[in-house]
Amino acid sequence: QVDIVVLMEHLDSSCEDNFAVDIIESSNSDILQDETTNKIGEKRVLEDNSMLIPKKLKLSVKLEFLKERIEQLVSDINMKRKRDSEMLEEFRKNLEQQTNIAVSRMEGSVYGVYDNTNRTIEEKLQEFMMVMARIEKQEAELEEFKRVLGLLYRSSVMAPEV
């Protein structure tokens, strides 16, 4: 929120800016006009007619008019800032929504990759288990063969020679 006192202090301290505002009397009418003077000394009339003040008004009325005008400007600034805040909040919500959608899609893709990888791992694990079962069977057959061979050897060594 803009504070009028701060704005008035700013106006008092802004005399060193590029433009200085002079209120001059118009020779053709009873209205004072705002003019600005740039650093080169060129004068130009402001197009904002809201600052036009009747010349015959007393100083207190002119000050009151200026005060009301400043209050209106401050009100306008505050309203625009509020609108900006609302726009930023709406942007934030839209961005969050779009981010959530993108994250959901990414999660779906990642979980799809996980499913494919799990299937592949499961297939390889099943093949491994089958190979291990064959190895166990062949080891058992080898043990049986060794046992039979040992019996055969003992029976041939212990058998009488004929």
Image (cartoon, grey):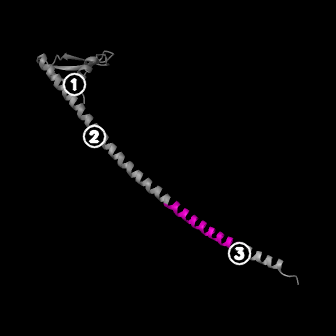
The front one of 129 and 10 is: 129
Q: Is residue 160 left or right of residue 54?
A: right
Q: Are marks 1 and 3 in contact (CB under 8 Å)?
A: no
The front one of 101 and 138 is: 138
Magenta stretch: includes residue 127:
yes
Q: Which residue is mark 3?
A: 144
Q: Is residue 12 left or right of residue 102?
A: left
Q: In the displayed structure, would residue 71 be above or below residue 83? A: above
Residue at 60% x, 69% y is 130
Question: Marks 3 and 2, how far apart in space?
Answer: 85 Å
Question: Marks 1 and 3, how far apart in space?
Answer: 104 Å
Report the span colored magenta: 115-143
Image quadrant in which you'd find residue 104: bottom left
Image quadrant in which you'd find residue 14: top left
Q: Nearer the viewer, mark 1 or mark 3?
A: 3
Predominant SS of the magenta segment: helix
- Residue 4 is situated, as x and y percent measured from the top left of the image, at 21, 25
Q: Nearer the viewer, mark 3 or mark 2?
A: 3
- Residue 29 seen anywhere in this rendered image of the structure: no
- Residue 40 is situated, as x and y percent measured from the top left of the image, at 33, 16
Q: Amino acid at mark 1?
A: Ile
Decide which of tag 1 and tag 3 comes sooner along the chain. 1
Q: Which residue is mark 2?
A: 86
Name the disc covering residue 4, or none: 1
